[in-house]
Amino acid sequence: MMEKVETRPMPRSALILGVAGLIPFVGLTAFPIIAPDAAGLGARAFHMALVTYAALIASFLGGVRWGNALSKPERQTSEFVIAVLPSLVAWLSLATPRPYDLMMLIGVFLALGISDVGLTLSGGAPRWYGQLRVGLTAVVVSSLIAALFSQG
């Protein structure tokens, strides 16, 4: 059954904080390309920082889904499973060698983006949340793909 989709405008703070959360993705991908020897840090340090940050954000997004599931009186087991999977896959990516760690994270963020749009379309989240997630997911996945191909 499809619920009515909420149409209130996106809170400015959600947009600002969401965009600010992209800075590490873009920076940790671009900086080693632009200045590979800067500050004496090697490509491995940037790679680990990117993978760790991506894992943290994937876990955060899973937490958003967990909170959403808790707010529903008809809590479904599947909603809690969907909420926990990003953290588990992200955690595994931390112990996975490159390039497979980035591939796992790309998959997690694509799945989260699709899932969050579905949540919005079903009325489980405000329309602005789906719009925000599409834009943020596009930048995150693009950054991770760029890192995948540049860090070889």
Image: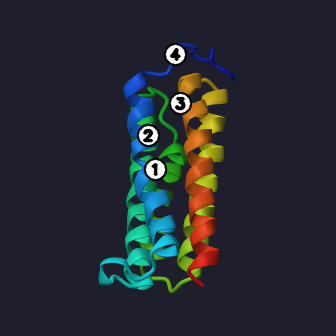
Quarter holding the N terminus is: top right
| Residue 9 badge | 4
Quarter holding the C terminus is: bottom right
- Which quadrant holds residue 51? bottom left
Q: CA distance from mark 2 to mark 4?
A: 15 Å
Within 10 angstroms of label 3, few (less than 14), some, or many (20 or more) residues?
A: some
Q: CA distance from mark 1 to mark 2?
A: 7 Å
What amino acid is labelled 4 in the image? Pro
Which residue is under mark 3?
129
Cβ–Cβ below 8 Å for labels 3 and 1?
Answer: no
- Which quadrant holds residue 7? top right
- Indicate left or right for 135 with 88 as reference: right
Which residue is under mark 1?
22
Q: CA distance from mark 4 to mark 1?
A: 21 Å
Cβ–Cβ below 8 Å for labels 2 and 3?
Answer: no
Q: Residue at x 58, y 51 (%)?
A: 139
- In the structure shown, which secondary structural element does the residue marked by tag 1 occupy? helix
| Residue 21 screen position, x and y as percent | 41, 47
Q: Is residue 38 above or below residue 142?
A: below
Cβ–Cβ below 8 Å for labels 1 and 2?
Answer: yes
Q: Earlier in the sequence, mark 3 or mark 1?
A: 1
